[in-house]
Image (tube, helix red, strand yellow):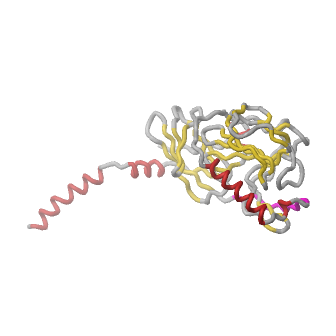
């Protein structure tokens, strides 16, 4: 008799618990109906939705840009599934990105007889100091966006970018990290231009990068320009899109005059070509099915 009464109490309680919705179950249900979009490290995908306000990927979230969520995939991102979300006027929407492996290849580089080819202990100390300064740049707070897509050209006319993501081998020794930007071979001395309005957060002669400029454009977007022959801006200065930052050169670890241009968006290092082309060419996130 006691056992029968206990079942009479437990079964309705269990049924009630199963009927209570949770944020976890709701999100998982949405993901269960969402097709995965494939993307390689160093690329970018977009999700346009009416009234889009906030975007999130993993533990990071940010404002939508003109009604569109952009999800940059860091060049060093691990392969596998990644959950993304979009918040607009209705319920939060979920989708998945399947990060697939991509081999950008390897390049053998023979640098000229410069300190960067065989850095001394003092040279490496200087570079370590440069990394500390950059760490402060990457940790800076994300402000409102001061740009639209596509970005302006960093040099005109803009040649084809090359070597993004490749593993560089210098004098038989592989570099610690892949090539995080693209190289642009423009005429020697060409003006190097800001790709959007922003604030110069760093402008100095760095050991490996040479004369370098870093600009914060808001919304977590940092643009970078390396190997300049001279600098025409300084840290803290406000710049406008198309403003001259310096001139193309070969300072730092460079085999000849060229512009190294890179971007870091929401702390993800991606191929800058995605932001220099029309946004309509950026791959779209697969929509959730009913």
Does 15 appear above or below 174?
Answer: above
Q: Position of residue 98 (x, y in %)?
A: 59, 54
Residue numbers of the magenta segment: 102-112
Is 198 on the left or on the right of 118, as rendered? left
Residue at image location 46% in from the left, 47% down from the top? 30
Farthest left residue in view:
1
Say which of 260 and 67 sits in front: 260
Q: Magenta: predominant secondary structure element?
A: loop
Quadrant location of the N terminus in the rendered image: bottom left
The answer to whether residue 206 of the structure is visible from this angle is: yes
Does 187 appear above or below 127?
Answer: above
Does 27 appear above or below 280?
Answer: below
Q: Is residue 103 magenta?
A: yes
The answer to whether residue 281 of the structure is visible from this angle is: no
The quarter of the displayed image where residue 111 is located: bottom right
The quarter of the displayed image where residue 121 is located: bottom right
Please count the marks in the image. 0
Is 171 on the left or on the right of 50, as rendered? right
Q: Position of residue 28 (x, y in %)?
A: 44, 52
Q: Is residue 218 magenta?
A: no
Q: Position of residue 184 (x, y in %)?
A: 83, 45
Does 16 appear above or below 218?
Answer: below
Residue at image location 68% in from the left, 38% down from the top? 236
Say which of 104 and 126 sits in front: 126
Q: Position of residue 164 (x, y in %)?
A: 76, 52
Is 84 on the left or on the right of 165, as rendered? left
Say which of 167 and 95 sits in front: 167
């Amino acid at each position: 008799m006691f056992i029968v009464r206990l079942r009479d109490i437990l079964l309705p309680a269990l049924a009630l618990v199963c009927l209570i919705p949770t944020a976890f179950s709701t999100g998982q249900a949405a993901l269960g109906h969402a097709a995965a979009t494939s993307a390689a490290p160093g690329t970018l995908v977009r999700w346009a939705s009416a009234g889009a306000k906030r975007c999130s990927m993993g533990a990071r979230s940010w404002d939508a840009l003109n009604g569109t969520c952009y999800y940059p995939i860091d060049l060093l991102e691990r392969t596998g599934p990644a959950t993304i979300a979009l918040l607009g006027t209705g319920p939060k929407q979920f989708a998945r990105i399947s990060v697939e492996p991509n081999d950008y290849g390897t390049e053998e580089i023979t640098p000229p007889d410069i300190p960067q080819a065989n850095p001394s202990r003092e040279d490496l100390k200087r570079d370590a100091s440069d990394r500390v300064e950059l760490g402060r740049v990457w940790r800076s707070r994300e402000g409102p966006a001061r740009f639209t897509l596509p970005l302006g050209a960093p040099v005109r006319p803009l040649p084809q970018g090359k070597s993004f993501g490749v593993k560089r081998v210098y004098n038989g020794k592989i570099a610690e990290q892949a090539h995080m930007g693209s190289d642009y071979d423009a005429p020697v001395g060409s003006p190097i231009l800001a790709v959007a309005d922003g604030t110069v957060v760093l402008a100095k002669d760095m050991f490996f990068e040479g004369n370098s400029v870093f600009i914060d454009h808001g919304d977590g977007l940092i643009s970078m320009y390396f190997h300049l022959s001279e600098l025409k801006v300084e840290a803290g200065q406000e710049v406008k899109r198309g403003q001259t930052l310096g001139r193309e050169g070969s300072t730092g670890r460079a085999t000849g005059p060229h512009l190294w241009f890179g971007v870091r968006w929401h702390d993800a290092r991606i191929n800058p070509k995605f932001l220099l082309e029309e946004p309509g060419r950026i791959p779209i996130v697969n929509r959730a099915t009913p």
